[in-house]
């Protein structure tokens, strides 16, 4: 199926002006389902990044001076405009990112929900009156926005990961520079056009697109006016950003890699657990930081679980995300396909059994695209790559276990600590296991965990800071202590 949407050539947004890169450079954006060029974006320069920071810094005093109510109203209006454009933004997302159109529409709603949620949080950034230690003094605290913020966002959720950062930043009275992934700049621009059309003042949000991520990072980290950087991406890049932040002690929020365990105890509802694993593992072709990577199934139900999972995964429809009925779209590029296949081939070589899938899809409807068959592997062990590395693809590896103590130890044996899942109908076990798992997010009897009203973030090498929930705005606020002397009694 081909799109009826015409090619989309976007611009940078700097100080309320949509413009070209300073040197006129551009790069193409391609559809991972077909390899076709669907648009282009400016290949921004260091001069452009500095101009965006200038614009954000210039807009900061006036935006910071607005009332929380004013900011909340603008955020709610921006959420409305995004929802009004769900078909347009969803189509753009599917064309450049590949996910099925239904998933893309769902992400647009998810993106809008962050602006709506943080509109409410803007109105609750309370300070305190603190009982003084000295009767002659009065003690107050204020919570104020940190200043200019940089948001570096990933390609797998190009709308929602941006609003998850912009929502709290704007609510706190901060201005922002956004750098989206070069694979998905068109979605970012479409969302920012909606925010702009909602009436947000010029310079409050700015957009820089560029293929030179290293250059953009150097400019952002080198400018003292940028007080905070929020990044979603790999652990390796996150570590580089931590080192870069040390020179000016910049505040960071880092949502990094994951390697989520998915545990199914033998008292679980097998059908429910199978559906939950599919929802977690195969959404967005397995390209999510919280998707299940290691599935541990208790021995008493292992064979039945493998059979049901294999049958359901084999029936998942794969193809262009614009085609009706498609459950799995393409991977973002050939490198993703190659990594998924490397994990599968390594596992089979080391003794795993291929239940279904395990191949790159080619031929009619697949040529030109980056498609990999949804795959299930039986008998995964800890010497296999898939057990130790984040696959970021539509491959589920299954491992058998016997006891609760054993599986908790195996689940925690990872440098990552973003998300974990488990299924049980024993509610004493539910509480016990949830407390023992060393992860920032726990899905108990569910495979879908993300929501604007919940704190999202990891522990260990999965990063620090939280996005979403009532604590999400804290990442963008400084607490100021005011001691007033000479008041008397």
Image: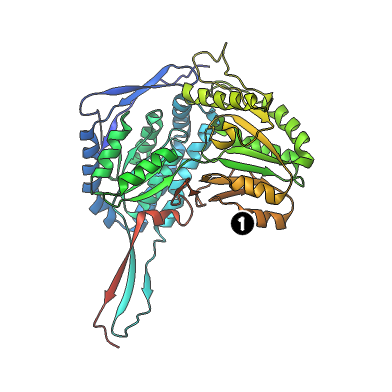
Q: Residue at x 50, y 18 (%)?
A: 369
In the displayed image of the protein, which residue is found farthest to the bottom? 489
In the displayed image of the protein, which residue is found farthest to the top? 364
Quarter of the image for residue 419 reads: top right
Query: Residue 136 placed where, x, y %?
Result: 28, 84
Q: Is residue 94 visible?
A: yes
* Viewer-closest of 227 and 398: 398
Q: Can you say which quadrant of the picture contains the C terminus?
A: bottom left
Q: Is residue 77 visible?
A: no
Query: Residue 403 placed where, x, y %?
Result: 73, 48
* Viewer-closest of 239 and 193: 239
Question: Is 26 placed left or right of 299 in the picture?
Answer: left
Is disc 1 placed on a helix, strand or loop?
helix
- The residue at which mark 1 appears reads as 435
Query: Residue 133 placed where, x, y %?
Result: 35, 82
Q: Residue at x 53, y 35 (%)?
A: 390
How many badges with numbers are in the image?
A: 1
Q: Residue at x 48, y 40 (%)?
A: 257
Question: Is 46 placed left or right of 84 in the picture?
Answer: left
* Viewer-closest of 219 and 405: 405
The image's colour scheme reads rainbow
């Amino acid at each position: 199926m081909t799109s009826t949407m015409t090619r989309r050539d976007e611009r940078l947004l700097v100080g309320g002006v949509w413009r070209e890169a300073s040197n006129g450079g551009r790069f193409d954006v391609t559809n991972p389902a077909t390899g076709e060029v669907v648009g282009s974006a400016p290949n921004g320069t260091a001069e452009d990044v500095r101009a965006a920071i200038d614009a954000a810094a210039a807009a900061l005093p006036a935006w910071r001076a607005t009332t929380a109510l004013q900011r909340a109203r603008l955020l709610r209006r921006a959420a409305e405009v995004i929802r009004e454009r769900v078909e347009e933004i969803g189509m753009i997302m599917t064309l450049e990112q590949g996910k099925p159109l239904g998933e893309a529409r769902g992400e647009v709603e998810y993106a809008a929900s962050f602006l709506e949620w943080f509109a409410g949080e803007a109105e609750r950034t309370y300070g305190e009156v603190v009982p003084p230690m000295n009767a002659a003094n009065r003690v107050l605290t204020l919570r104020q926005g940190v200043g200019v913020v940089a948001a570096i966002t990933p390609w797998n959720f190009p709308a929602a990961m941006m609003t998850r950062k912009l929502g709290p930043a704007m609510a706190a009275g901060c201005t922002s520079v956004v750098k989206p992934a070069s694979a998905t700049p068109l979605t970012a621009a479409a969302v920012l056009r909606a925010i702009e059309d909602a009436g947000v003042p010029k310079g409050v949000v700015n957009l820089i697109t560029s293929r030179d991520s290293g250059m953009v990072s150097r400019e952002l980290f080198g400018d003292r006016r940028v007080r905070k950087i929020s990044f979603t991406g790999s652990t390796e890049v996150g570590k580089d950003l931590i080192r870069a932040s040390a020179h000016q002690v910049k505040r960071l929020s880092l949502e990094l890699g994951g390697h989520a365990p998915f545990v199914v105890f033998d008292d679980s509802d097998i059908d429910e657990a199978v559906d939950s694993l599919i929802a977690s593992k195969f959404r967005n072709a397995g390209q999510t930081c919280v998707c299940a990577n290691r599935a541990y199934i208790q021995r008493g139900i292992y064979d039945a679980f493998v059979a049901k999972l294999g049958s359901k995964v084999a029936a998942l429809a794969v193809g262009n995300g614009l085609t009706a009925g498609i459950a799995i779209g393409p991977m973002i590029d050939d490198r993703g396909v190659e990594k998924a296949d490397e994990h599968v081939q390594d596992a089979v070589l080391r003794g795993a059994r291929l239940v279904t899938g395990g191949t790159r899809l080619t031929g009619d409807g697949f040529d030109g695209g980056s498609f990999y068959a949804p795959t299930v592997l039986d008998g995964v062990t800890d010497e296999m790559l898939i057990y130790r590395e984040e696959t970021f693809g539509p491959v589920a590896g299954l491992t058998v276990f016997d006891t609760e103590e054993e599986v908790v130890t195996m689940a925690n044996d990872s440098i990552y600590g973003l998300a974990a899942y488990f299924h049980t109908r024993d509610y004493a076990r539910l509480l016990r296991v949830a407390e023992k798992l060393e992860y920032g997010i726990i899905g108990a009897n569910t495979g879908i965990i993300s929501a604007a009203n919940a704190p999202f973030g990891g522990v260990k090498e999965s990063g620090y800071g939280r996005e979403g929930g009532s604590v999400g705005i804290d990442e963008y606020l400084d607490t100021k202590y005011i001691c007033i002397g000479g008041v008397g009694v």
